[in-house]
Amino acid sequence: MDVQIEKLTKTYGPQTAVNNISFDVKTGEVLGFLGPNGAGKSTTMKMITGFIGIEKGDIRIGGKSVTDTNGDFKQHIGYLPENNPLYLDMPIMDYLEFCASLQGVEKAKINSRIREMIGVCGLDREKHKKIGELSKGYRQRVGLAQAMIHDPEILVLDEPTTGLDPNQIIEIRKLIRDLGKEKTVILSTHILPEVEATCDRILIINRGNIVADGTPETLRKQAQGNEVLKLQIEDGDTGNILESLNALDTVATAAIIGQEENLFEVQSMADTSSRRKIFDLCVEKKWVLTQLTPLETKLEDIFRNLTLN
């Protein structure tokens, strides 16, 4: 089920939390929704789920506006809020039964859905405990289970791996990827490697405005600019190598980054590559080229460049 965000705006007094943003999320897509604290991520996710009202603009779920009072859009959405509110005095099984009832799961199917969520979210060993007796990581798993108990077509997950240990994180990432093959998933996180491991597409919001939208590869290419290479050259004098690299007509700048190892960083001229010229130079000078690595712009660098201003 597709989600369309159309010119969405939300203000709190003089502060604009979300500023006239528009984007779509397609069925079978996992969207990584990124931004610094206070950028408008959680506010947008709360409006998508109906947790808070829309001030201006519209959200369409499966083509229907969420402002339609006759709509039943909430039954199609599973939501894990950032703070994961839980009833700590309730046993896990009772809590999931309660959530299933609230979400309109047929009574005859509730027990089978609970068993499935207990297995999917790795809660089998803890299932007879009260939620208040669980670690933070297991409470997060209970939150994921309640978000999925009614088998929604859309999942909105705000920081889903908070508090999980590395093994749990890997398991939940795999679960999200698997769910994303058939559902629409919007995932907010501050863990950037998690985005690359899980998401098909990244949307970055800053100060209420969308500042980037694309696949991780697309965003890196857009940010890459000129070619940057890391080199290691042996059997030559460091100063002589640096002078020769800077003399190449495809090289904008060359710098020493490791004197003892003869390591260099070379930035090429715009829209050119220096790899062949560097190889030919080493052959001519009888230098041994032991490393030539293109340096890729990291997602962390892209995020910082887009959100620090």
Image (cartoon, helix red, strand yellow):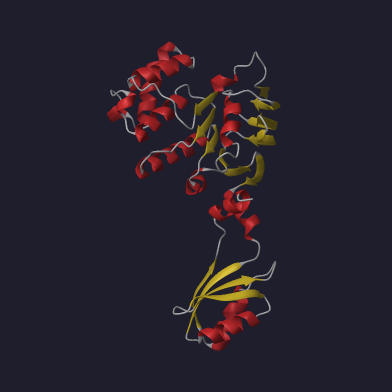
Q: Is residue 7 above or below residue 239?
A: above
Q: Is residue 129 above or below residue 191?
A: above
Q: Nearer the viewer, residue 284 or 239?
A: 239
Judge left or right: residue 123 versus residue 233: left
Q: Is residue 179 visible?
A: yes
Counting every numbered tag in the picture gives 0
Residue pushed farthest front?
Answer: 14
Residue 185 position by quadrant: top right
Judge left or right: residue 93 versus residue 210: left
Q: Nearer the viewer, residue 63 or 166?
A: 166
Coordinates of residue 67 in the picture (x, y in percent): 67, 20
Residue under the point 59% across and 44% down = 202
Q: Is residue 50 above or below residue 210?
A: above
**In which quadrant is the N terminus drawn?**
top right
Q: Is residue 105 visible?
A: no
Coordinates of residue 26 in the picture (x, y in percent): 62, 35
Judge left or right: residue 257 versus residue 25: left
Judge left or right: residue 197 versus residue 8: left
Q: Is residue 201 above or below residue 267?
A: above
Coordinates of residue 187 in the picture (x, y in percent): 53, 37
Residue under the point 59% across and 76% down = 254
Q: Nearer the viewer, residue 89 or 24?
A: 89
Q: Nearer the viewer, residue 6 or 82?
A: 82
Coordinates of residue 198 in the picture (x, y in percent): 50, 43
